[in-house]
């Protein structure tokens, strides 16, 4: 029986690739930070607008008239290679307690808070988180 010598770098290259990685349906393997990771194949969009309408990633629409802060989207698992982020919207009273509108949207990412206010058209505030 013949023995084969395999270097550590050869073994590492074989293990750290997408060649033998099986991902769930709807996902594919991508190399992220030198590691094979299963990531979604598709993209989707969500948004908030007006008095206040929310459109979800799965295409549903909701109207929330409360004056709460709502999470639009956030990461729950850093293993897919996305930076940790949180996007939230704050509804404000419109003068009538039964009606509100999106008054502020804030993105928390890379240690920064990036905020856009309805009352400050054309301006974006950036501050340390």
Image (cartoon, helix red, strand yellow):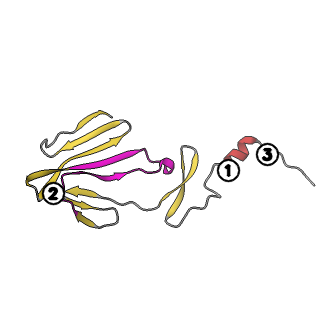
Name, please, the residue furthest toward the top: 128
> Which is more foreground, mark 3 or mark 2?
2
Pinpoint residue 58: horizontal percent, then vertical percent: 34, 66
Is 75 magenta? The answer is: yes
Tell me the quadrant of the picture where the N terminus can be found: bottom right
Label ID, residue 15: 1
Pinpoint residue 5: horizontal percent, then vertical percent: 83, 45
Left or right position of 18 against 53? right
> Which is more foreground, mark 3 or mark 1?
1
Residue behind mark 2:
50
> Which is more foreground, mark 1 or mark 2?
2
Return the disc, 1 or 2, that comes first in the chain's sequence. 1
Residue in the picture at 17% in, 39% down? 123
Pinpoint residue 49: horizontal percent, then vertical percent: 19, 56
Residue in the picture at 41% in, 50% down? 75
Distance, label 1 to label 2, CA atoms, is 50 Å
Q: What span is in magenta?
A: 63-90
Distance, label 3 to label 1, CA atoms, is 13 Å
- Tell me the SS state at disc 3: loop
Label ID, residue 6: 3
Name, please, the residue furthest toward the left: 95
Left or right position of 12 against 37? right
Left or right position of 5 against 86? right
Distance, label 3 to label 2, CA atoms, is 62 Å
């Amino acid at each position: 029986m013949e023995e084969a010598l395999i270097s550590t770098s050869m073994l590492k290259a074989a293990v750290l690739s997408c060649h033998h990685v099986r991902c769930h349906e709807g996902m594919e393997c991508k190399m992220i930070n030198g590691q094979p990771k299963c990531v979604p194949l598709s993209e989707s969009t969500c948004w908030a607008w007006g008095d206040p309408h929310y459109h979800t990633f799965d295409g549903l629409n909701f109207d929330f008239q409360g004056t709460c802060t709502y999470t639009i989207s956030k990461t729950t698992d850093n293993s897919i290679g996305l930076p940790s982020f949180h996007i939230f919207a704050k509804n404000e009273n419109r003068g009538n307690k039964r009606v509100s509108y999106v008054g502020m949207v804030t993105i928390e990412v890379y240690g920064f808070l990036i905020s856009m206010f309805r009352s400050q058209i054309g301006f974006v505030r950036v501050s340390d988180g």
